[in-house]
Amino acid sequence: MNKFLDRQKLTLALASLLLLVITACSLDVTNPNSASEDQVLTTREGVIALAAGIQQNYAIGVVEAMILTPGVTSGEIAINSTFTNLLELQDGGDQVTTGNGNVLALWSRPIRVISMANDLINSAPNVTLDPGTRSGIIALAHLYKAMSMGVLAQAFEQAPIELDENGKSIFQPRAEVLASAISLLDAAAQLLATTPASNEFTTQILGRNFDLVNTINAYRARYNLMVGRYQQAFDAAASVNLASTSVFTYDDRNPNPIYQLVFLNRNYAARDNFGSALIESGDGRVAFFLTPADRTNPSPYNLPIDDLKGFFDTPTKTIPVYLPGEMNLIKAEALVRQSRLAEAVVEINAVRTKTTDPFGVAAGLPIYSGPVTESARCQCRAQSQLLSVSRSRTLEQPQHTAGPDDLTTTHGAWYCAMPRFFPHDASKFRKTINRQLGGQRAGVDHGGTKPANRKPPCCDRCRDLGGNHGAPTEARAGCGLRRGLARARTGESRR
């Protein structure tokens, strides 16, 4: 009898252990107190929360990638640590491949924002909202989708216009991606003209000090210029109120991402004079952004570096979405491209002679007095250091030998490099799209070994190859939708 009881106890113990092992294998436990993403997007609160989340996601993750990645590849920023991804980025050329985690970050972060924007566009019409609140949210989603598509189009030769979570996203040439982004911006502008945003939207949902209408028009100007629609670019730039400002805001919980990686983690540093030999003496914009420092970045590069300031030297400093002077320069280039050179000089002088500016970015230079020729075709650099648009796709190496009185150099410094793009693997990037649509993030390599056979930064016909080291911010930013869901449950709508 005792043997039978002992055997029965042993059987029960083994069964209990087996049950414990089986149940322990499943980590996907449903939280009865947590709503799913689909459920939240069918509620007013959930849509409002996602509208707040998309702004935060872009301001932290995408802004970091689009500033620091091209900052290194254009020679404005130097690496200041020995992470493998950064070493590859500084080396450039064939050293950087699609396996570089920073290239993946530059790809996956805008993709995530596009996915969030799609959710807003599809969900906002189906929940109870004031008409002006609905139009504001949909216009905001159009804007952030367009901005993210623009980041992809500047960095990669091809990108998807529509996302497919089944791995069937069709990659389109960058010109078509930009054209689609322009259509989104035009739709946003028309929507707000027909149904202006409500007070609820502007005070409780839209980011602080973010001018939605002017930002839409500024991006219409940027992207129309990039695709060669010069009159449309001029008209859009002319419609922007230059006395108004629009910024990405940060706080102690969500700090300025450039500050984090330049001052806190010290992974990057500004190149001396932003790496340019063509900065005009006395240009006040350089003093706005840089403090001279007698230092170099790590060996074997030993590049002279300065201390970065401007919009980046404290954790709570705002970063402009665009600079007012950029609109003058877009108009100037649009006029040059239409052979209206005398009018272009007027716009250039508006930037050169400026002594006051809403952000303090003022050159304080004399008027342009050089020749006015058809060769004038390159864009301002110092006006929009670290914030410029097209440089994210070019390793802009100075190739011009004319003096500072040539119209092509009056903006402070100019570059005419052959546009090259970050490497991309369609199959790998489609998998990244699938992960983003599934709420996951692409991994980032944190290795510390140096790659073999390093090449100088300007090798292989100045190819723009590389990506930013974004791991710290990637971990901080997380998934904006998940943050939005949390806010929906707590009733918080605006950061």
Image (cartoon, helix red, strand yellow):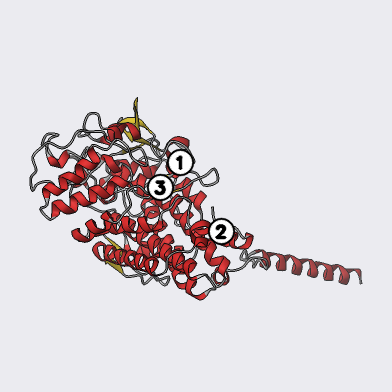
Verify CB contact (< 8 Å) between mark 3 and mark 1.
no
Q: Read off the residue under disc 2.
A: 493
Q: Earlier in the sequence, mark 2 or mark 1?
A: 1
Viewer-nearest residue: 163 or 26: 163
The circle drawn on residue 479 is none
Verify CB contact (< 8 Å) between mark 2 and mark 1.
no
Q: Residue at x 42, y 42 (%)?
A: 258
Q: Earlier in the sequence, mark 3 or mark 2?
A: 3
Residue 66 image position (x, y, % from top left): 36, 50
Q: Earlier in the sequence, mark 3 or mark 1?
A: 3
Viewer-nearest residue: 28 or 195: 195
As measured in the structure, the alpha-carbon distance from the residue carrying label 2 to the one carrying label 1 is: 22 Å
Q: For the residues carrying marks 3 and 2, which lies nearer the camera in this image?
A: 2
Q: Read off the residue under disc 3.
A: 64
Q: Read off the residue under disc 1.
A: 317
Q: Amino acid at mark 2?
A: Ser
Q: Residue at x 41, y 65 (%)?
A: 139
